[in-house]
Amino acid sequence: MEWTNTGQPASEPAASSSKKSASFLDRGALLILFAVSIALNFFLIGRVHQLTHKASNGQLLTIGAQVPDIHAQTVDGVPGKVVYASSSVPTVLYVFTPQCMWCKRNLPDLHALANQAGGKYRVIGISLTDRDLKQYIATQHLDFPVYTHLDSDTMAKYQMGGTPATIVVSPDGKIVNSWVGVYGDNIKNKIESTLSISLPGCCQS
């Protein structure tokens, strides 16, 4: 071992080499993190572009996607279930909340849709809250079944959140079509074509 003039042992070459290795590893880790960050940003940009494209077309879900039956509660708090196979015609899910201003403006179209159902489809209401729900159903004369208290997993699978939303599901549980927003010209025309009905229309989309 070498000694300095002060009598202290000289620094070992191995220690210097170890520091250089650690510094090299730190730079490598930073480069990896940087690459991962870039890849994640590209993924998020693509996802935002996809969602923006869907939103611009009023679309909520992918046509043909398989969705599960809905487990929820009735307005009286009784467990209920929307089973698509129990109906020989498509099910129209109308997603709303009593507090939604756009849902209120959409009511004339909702009533027209429900009145023209006949044997072509069945209408099911899905409220994202039970607050003021009973009173809303009574005052707005909603004469179709309404469910609430969906679990978070169901909410995620159906991408529920925006209101009003309209989802058409086939008897075998596949998305026929879906729209989010009021029945302005764009969405109105698509719903009329899909369900073979006539709507008064709400407002410009």
Image (cartoon, helix red, strand yellow):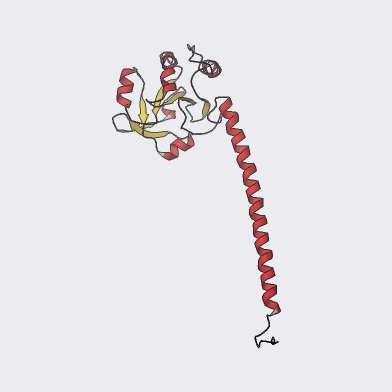
Horizontal arrangement in the rendering, residue 66 relative to residue 78 (left or right): right
In the rendered image of this protein, does residue 158 appear above or below residue 187?
A: below
The one of 52 and 200 positioned closer to us in this rendering: 52
The one of 105 and 154 positioned closer to us in this rendering: 105
**Residue at the outermost front position:** 6
Q: Which quarter of the rendered picture does the N terminus lie within?
A: bottom right
Horizontal arrangement in the rendering, residue 205 relative to residue 10 (left or right): left
Q: How many marks?
A: 0
Query: Could you tell me which residue is drawn at 30 percent across and 20 percent down?
Result: 138
Dividing the picture into quadrants, the one containing residue 73 is: top left
Residue 104 percent location from the top left of the image: 41, 19
Residue 66 percent location from the top left of the image: 51, 34
Dividing the picture into quadrants, the one containing residue 102 is: top left
In the rendered image of this protein, does residue 76 appear above or below residue 196?
A: below
Dividing the picture into quadrants, the one containing residue 101 is: top left
In the rendered image of this protein, does residue 23 appear above or below residue 115?
A: below
Q: Which quarter of the rendered picture does the C terminus lie within?
A: top right
Residue 184 percent location from the top left of the image: 52, 17
In the rendered image of this protein, does residue 189 appear above or below residue 9?
A: above
The one of 184 and 122 positioned closer to us in this rendering: 184
**Residue at the outermost left position:** 76
